[in-house]
Image (tube, helix red, strand yellow):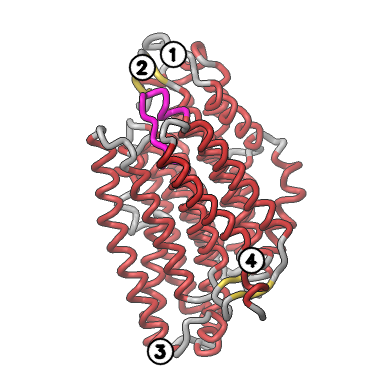
């Protein structure tokens, strides 16, 4: 393949990289034009999404970059999610007197890294994508430099993220050493019929590193503190697109690189999935801060996504992709609701703050109710159908006992979702809320629509798209 053909396959990444550099120079000369910069970043992201959806399929740069149905599915969802978070965050910062032109630039760089993760075809592009998006997220977490909690969140994220990157890199070096290649297809040939001891050790280290990136237990320790300390719109971003990118990378590594060793890595993923479900369910019961509560909710829900992947089948990967897209809608919408809410200029982030919200802000209270019930998995909300897909894939793969355990964890977690709804609907209001920001309210209510039964209509295109994407990973 010629170099020009390689560049054609990498065109979405080139759009993001060029756009980020352009906005960086623009911001340096006109740092107060934050609204125009944010609008330009949204256009760049949507342009990259269109280029991805209409671009050719193939492998570029000696197999290091892959453009296929799976990469297209993931990157379009990631770029759209990033575009939604930009107005949410930009206006939130401006209302608090913070006008950082770096915010949309960092979102673009994070999106570039996540796109590389979704298209990674070897260990080098895998690591470059992970580090590029992680570095941008560390800075975003500490974006409010005058806020002690945000600075603490950014520092904790950076230190623990560096540890996970070390695990990932060490595992990749072991895999390279024992497989003799960094390309996933060559690694698959070395692992055909089962991975040897060296490959298996490397794979376990890589799984641990990627488990950190998706907040899977027992590598979840950073999540509650970072969610609590980071600005609310940034948390909406953290909890959605990066998780999908890391799960797709997970699937590509295991499906393309270690498809011949499914029984060996399956047991590791099942353990991680169930630990995540129960840590998220039980630890969330004690939380009063909603950002920490939804951090544990995120840990539990990632457990369900990992369980789908642990099935080791194409059906399991398809279930994981459907689950992640529907979960992205729920978590982004919930944090959009939190971004819209304040009382006397103070952010509303605790259970007590939500008392009587249905009387003060009925639209937002209804949206938060829908997101909570969907994350719980109550029919007929979207989260129910997402969990049905995952449990069915697990049962079909002979992991019925794990599906039952996951269902028990979901029942336990129901308490804290229902407690939030009870506080919003039946407790006495503790004071009048401020007028919600129009952009946050529109995003929250708009996303809430997809948590209602109308999502069944969306599944008519989401499910086939996920099936085509899952077929690209090579699992039967």
First along the sequence among labels 3 and 4: 3
| Mark 3, other Cα within 10 Å: few <14 / some 14–19 / many ≥20 | some
Q: Which residue occupies the foreground of this view, 426 or 473?
A: 473
Whether residue 392 appears in this view of the structure is no
Quarter residue 134 falls in: bottom left
Q: Please name the residue shown 42% across and 9% down the image.
A: 432
- Residue receiving disc 4: 396
Q: Which residue occupies the foreground of this view, 267 or 22?
A: 22
| Residue 111: x %, y % from top left | 51, 53
Q: Which mark is residue 345?
A: 2
Quarter of the image with the C terminus in it? bottom right
| Residue 238: x %, y % from top left | 44, 46
First along the sequence among labels 4 and 2: 2
Quick check: 252 above or below 406? below
Left or right relative to 178: residue 358: right
| Disc 2 and disc 3 in contact, CB within 8 angstroms | no
- Residue receiving disc 1: 434
| Mark 2, other Cα within 10 Å: few <14 / some 14–19 / many ≥20 | few
Marks 3 and 4, how far apart at CA = 33 Å
Q: Which residues are magenta?
A: 91-104
């Amino acid at each position: 393949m010629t170099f020009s053909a390689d560049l054609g396959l990498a065109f979405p990444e080139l759009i993001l990289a060029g756009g980020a550099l352009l906005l960086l120079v623009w911001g340096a000369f006109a740092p107060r034009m934050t609204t125009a910069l944010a609008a330009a970043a949204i256009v760049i992201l949507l342009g990259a999404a269109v280029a991805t959806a209409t671009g050719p399929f193939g492998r570029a740069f000696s197999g290091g970059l892959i453009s296929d149905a799976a990469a297209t599915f993931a990157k379009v969802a990631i770029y759209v999610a990033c575009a939604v978070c930009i107005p949410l965050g930009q206006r939130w910062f401006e209302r608090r007197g913070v006008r950082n032109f770096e915010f949309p630039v960092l979102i673009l760089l994070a999106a570039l890294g996540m796109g590389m993760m979704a298209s990674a075809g070897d260990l080098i592009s895998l690591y470059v994508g992970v580090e590029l998006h992680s570095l941008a997220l560390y800075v975003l977490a500490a974006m409010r430099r005058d806020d002690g909690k945000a600075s603490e969140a950014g520092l904790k994220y950076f230190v623990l993220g560096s540890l996970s990157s070390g695990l990932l890199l060490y595992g990749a070096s072991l895999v390279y050493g024992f497989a003799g290649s960094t390309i996933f297809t060559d690694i698959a040939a070395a692992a055909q019929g089962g991975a040897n001891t060296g490959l298996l050790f490397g794979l376990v280290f890589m799984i641990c590193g990627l488990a950190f990136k998706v907040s899977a237990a027992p590598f979840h320790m950073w999540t509650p503190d970072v969610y609590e300390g980071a600005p609310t719109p940034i948390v909406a971003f953290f909890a959605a697109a990066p998780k999908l990118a890391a799960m797709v990378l997970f699937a590509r590594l295991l499906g393309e690189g270690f498809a011949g060793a499914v029984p060996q890595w399956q047991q590791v993923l099942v353990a991680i999935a169930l630990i995540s479900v129960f840590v998220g369910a039980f630890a969330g019961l004690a939380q009063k801060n909603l950002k920490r509560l939804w951090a544990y909710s995120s840990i539990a829900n990632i457990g369900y996504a990992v369980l789908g992947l642990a099935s080791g089948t194409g059906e399991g990967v398809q279930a994981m992709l459907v689950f992640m897209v529907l979960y992205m809608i729920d978590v982004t919408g919930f944090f959009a609701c939190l971004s819209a809410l304040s009382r006397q200029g103070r952010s509303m982030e605790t259970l007590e703050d939500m008392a009587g919200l249905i009387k003060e802000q009925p639209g937002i209270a209804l949206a938060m109710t829908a997101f909570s019930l969907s994350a719980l998995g109550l029919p007929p909300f979207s989260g129910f159908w997402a969990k049905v897909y995952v449990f069915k894939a697990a049962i079909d793969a002979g992991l019925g006992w794990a599906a039952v355990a996951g269902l028990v964890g979901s029942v336990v977690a129901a308490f804290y979702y229902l407690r939030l709804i009870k506080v919003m609907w039946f407790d006495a209001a503790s004071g009048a809320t401020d007028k919600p920001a129009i952009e946050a309210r529109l995003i929250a209510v708009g996303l809430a629509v997809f948590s209602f039964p109308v999502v069944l209509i969306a599944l008519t295109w989401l499910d086939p798209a996920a099936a085509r994407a899952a077929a690209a990973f090579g699992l039967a």
